[in-house]
Image (tube, rainbow, N blue to C red):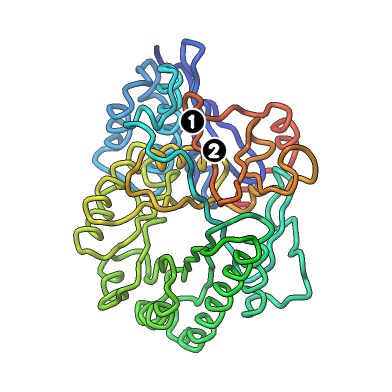
Amino acid sequence: MKITAIEIIKVPPSWVWIKVQTDTEHFGYGEPYLENHPETVIAEVKRLEPFLIGKDPTQVEKLWKVMYESGNGYFGGPIKLSAISGIDMALWDIASKAARIPVHQMLGGKIFNRIKVYRSTGGQMPWVVDPGDPYSAGSPSRPELQPNEPETYKEAAKVLVEEWGYRALKMHVSPGDGLEATSKVDKIAECFAAGKEGALEGGRNVGVNNVDIAIDIHNPNPAIGRQLIEVLAPHRPLFIEEPMPLERVDGLAQAVKGTNAAIAAGERWMGKHIFFDALSRGLLSVVQPDIAHAGGITETKKIAIMAEAAYAKLAIHCPLSPLAFAAAIQVDACTPNFLIQEHNEVNDSRPTTGLSKGLTVIGRGYFKDPYVIDSDGFIPTPESPGLGIEIDEKGMEEIMSKPWHAQRG
């Protein structure tokens, strides 16, 4: 079996997929994408394509190394690794389809029959949009509630647990990178406490005794990161995400020194080496590689293994399309230190008819069998070969008729 071509597919609202073709009936899908830089990554995919044509797609590790080392000694970086990530997903898809087993079986076998999923909440009530529409096309379900106020965080969390079926949430705040953000610290803690109260209340209303809630504080100045960790830690968040500027691991060390809170980071780190740096210093409880940026399935699995040796958990970052989500689930299922899986809320649906009526569905319109959140907040681990997905041709026809945007939807 040989690779014959790489097809670029621009999928609304803003995703970039590829379809790697072979000289057999087998093909594979992947998502090579970098937020707000899609054309640059597409150009890199096209640059890498000649290195792959005529090669055996099942030699995934070898081809990863060939792509990574191409470019006269310039390794890594967000553009190259995002391109490699998407191609790598597609190669695993092909290899596993050829073997007639799911990717997780190729990677050592399933550990988890179900994958726990969390949903983000950002200070507004949740809403859904039709497949292919950007999230901005919708609006909060209760516009009378003021954004970013404690009561709004509380109500949003309650609805997501009680009505939408989630059993884990992540709250988002954006204090900025200046020291003036110190004035926001106490209110952020108040909002988190309100969100946790709402999540627990929603859980009790449906007979659920515990709901995990994490918080992403989005790369503040390390001094503000330390302040936020101090006020948030007593509320026992599942983890506190990225309490520092992303460029320097020693910045993370400054922010987390002396804390006993669980710290998560890594969504914009590329490749295994920077994760090794942070893990070897004992700075992380949770690693968050983005499977569409950090090096695909191949590199994400290696990062997970390093994390296991450091007693850290895996929570793959996934704010892109359902295709990246499908790839992430394959790694989750076979990773002993898997914690929880993120997804992009733009991919949520709430069907009003059919078997999924009243449930939360991820990937409707894109896949024939979208993921359905069960009453415990999990989705079942797919058992079909490859990435475990089959494209919904009719749904995609409608999606592809919509505008495509370079900025992430």
**In which image quadrant can residue 57 be found?**
top left
Residue at 49% from the left image edge and 25% from the top image edge: 28
Q: Is residue 227 above or below residue 303?
A: below
Residue 160 in sight in this render: no
Residue at 49% from the left image edge and 63% from the top image edge: 212
Which amino acid, by three-letter code, is at mark 2? Leu
Q: Is residue 291 left or right of residue 37?
A: left
| CA distance for labels 2 and 1 | 9 Å
Residue carrying label 2: 323
Q: Is residue 144 above or below residue 47?
A: below
Residue 50 in sight in this render: yes
Q: Give the image location of residue 52, x and y in percent.
A: 38, 23
Q: Which residue lies furthest to the front in this view?
A: 207
Which amino acid, by three-letter code, is at mark 1? Leu
Q: Which residue lies furthest to the bottom in this view?
A: 183
Residue at 61% from the left image edge and 61% from the top image edge: 207
Instruction: From the viewer's side, name the closer residue of 159 and 284.
Output: 159
The label number, if any, that marks residue 171 in the structure image:
none
* Earlier-in-chain disc, 2 versus 1: 2
SS class of the residue under badge 1? loop
